[in-house]
Image (cartoon, rainbow, N blue to C red):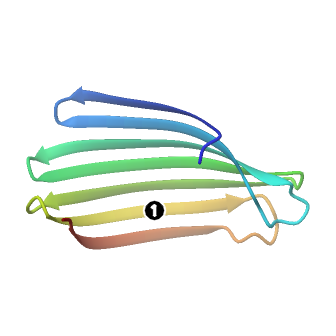
Amino acid sequence: MPTAGLRIVTSPSQLTSLRLALDQSVRETTTPAASGRLVTALTAQLDHELQRDLLARLQLRYAVDDYRGSGRRDEDVAAGVSLTYFASRHLHARLSLRHARLESNRAGVRSFRRNQFEFSLEVRY
């Protein structure tokens, strides 16, 4: 739950929507010597309807976790694309690709890069 935030939603055309969000929240942590974690995140999502039953989505995220009192700072960057096919009102198929990385300035904290490929079927009633 964000402590503070800003959201902008716009539709540059009838087929395209853009969502921008800037959030800041205070969270708990189990990191020694840190009193809490201040998370600042900027996200963007662009949706475009390629056809009536096919939606393309681009998502970007940049976040900084500042561990108060410990000097630790993590940067989290992610980008993803997806295609969703609406076979019917109740059945959707989604294909998505996401890349994420986490970098930390603290020795002993494991930085990583991850590529995730996903296919899903969704049934709604």
Q: Quadrant of the C terminus?
A: bottom left
Residue at screen point 33% across, 56% down: 81
Q: Where in the figure is residue 8, as x and y percent of width and height?
A: 43, 29
Query: From the viewer's perspective, is 109 left or right of 56?
Result: right
Q: Is residue 26 left or right of residue 106?
A: left
Q: Nearer the viewer, residue 28 or 47?
A: 28
Q: Residue furthest front?
A: 125
In this rendering, position of residue 27 left or right of residue 63: right
Residue 38 image offset from top left, x and y in percent: 73, 47
Residue drawn at the location 80% of the way across and 72% of the way down: 108
Report the front residue among 17 and 78: 17
* Identity of the residue drawn at 23% across and 50% down: 56
Picture quadrant of residue 90 = bottom left
Give coordinates of residue 85: x percent, y percent: 15, 60
Q: Position of residue 36 (x, y in %)?
A: 80, 54
Q: Nearest the camera: 15 or 101?
A: 15
Does 103 appear above or below 109?
above
Circle 1 residues within 10 Å: few <14, some 14–19, many ≥20: some
The disc labelled 1 sits on which kind of residue? His
| Residue matched to label 1 | 99
Left or right: where 52 falls relative to 33: left
Is 57 rendered above or below residue 19?
below
Image point 23% across, 58% down: which residue?
83
Query: How many numbered callouts?
Result: 1
Secondary structure of the residue carrying tag 1 is strand
Work out whether residue 96 or residue 25 is closer to the camera in this orientation and state it.
25
